[in-house]
Image: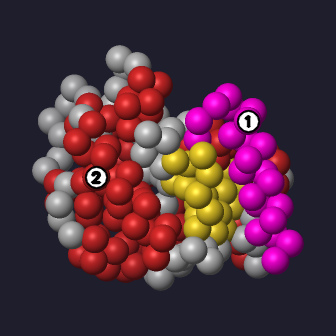
Amino acid sequence: MGRFIAVEGADGTGKSTQARLLAEYLGAVFTREPGGTPLGERIRDLVLDPDGDGPVDRAEALLMAAARAQHVELVVLPALAAGRDVVSDRYVASSVAYQGYGRGLGADVVADVNRFATGGLQPDLVVLVALDVPLAADRLGDERDRIERSGDGLQAKVVEAYKEMATADPDRWIVVDGSGTIDEVADRIARAIDEWLSR
């Protein structure tokens, strides 16, 4: 079985870039959420479209879980079974942070829905790219998707949620400073991963 690594972080932290670089570093399958499959990408468009008729909060959580169910079944599990490592840009912790905490739906409720969606599959490791909300907001610029447009209040709740999850499960979470250049952050992550692999 391969190893499953999720890269998490609030919007604007550089998480997506770092997830892709980590996959290259490890020679792993790179994928993303929501998305990763044709159906998942269509759901992504529905959820993130800043100009469309956006889903209500519960529908948003369920759509994310539906995309994740498809992703796990068609991409993640087959790759792991083939002995490939998988690096995913976001996984269940994103839903717990954004919909559970950020939207106020409740962490346990969102986690339960996603346990069903994933068949209970957990990542072997979660890499959290951490960055202060104002700096992350500056990085986003003006072109923002629907969730990114929800404002700094939502992002602040998301950041706190990630901190709580990382603190509660230190054996499975690595927190990496997201400030600095892309190469500097990638180097921090690579060193942290190497240390984790040597345990």
Percent x, y of residue 94: 41, 57
Q: Which comes sooner in the sequence, label 1 or label 2?
A: 2
Q: Answer yes or no: do the residues labelled 1 and 2 have beta carbons within 8 Å? A: no
Percent x, y of residue 182: 68, 31
* Residue hosting label 2: 157
Q: Quadrant of the N terminus?
A: bottom right
Mark 2 neighbour class, 10 Å CA radius: few under 14, some 14 to 19, many 20 or more: many
Residue 147 position by quadrant: top left
Q: Which residue lies furthest to the right in this view?
A: 198
Q: In this view, does 132 lie above or below 122?
A: above
- In front here: 199 or 24? 199
Magenta segment, prevailing SS (helix, strand or loop): helix
Residue found 43% across the figure and 50% down from its top: 34
* Residue hosting label 1: 184
Residue found 81% across the figure and 65% down from its top: 195
- In front here: 47 or 23? 23
Instruction: Please give the range of residues in magenta.
Output: 178-199
Query: For the residue labelled by badge 2, is the local secondary structure a helix, a strand or a loop?
Result: helix
Q: How far apart are marks 1 and 2 (CA)?
A: 26 Å
- Which amino acid does the dot numbered 1 rest on? Glu
Image disc number at residue 132: none
Query: For the residue labelled by badge 1, is the local secondary structure a helix, a strand or a loop?
Result: helix
Confirm whether the magenta stretch covers residue 138.
no
Residue 113 position by quadrant: bottom left
Mark 1 neighbour class, 10 Å CA radius: few under 14, some 14 to 19, many 20 or more: few
Residue 140 seen anywhere in this rendered image of the structure:
no
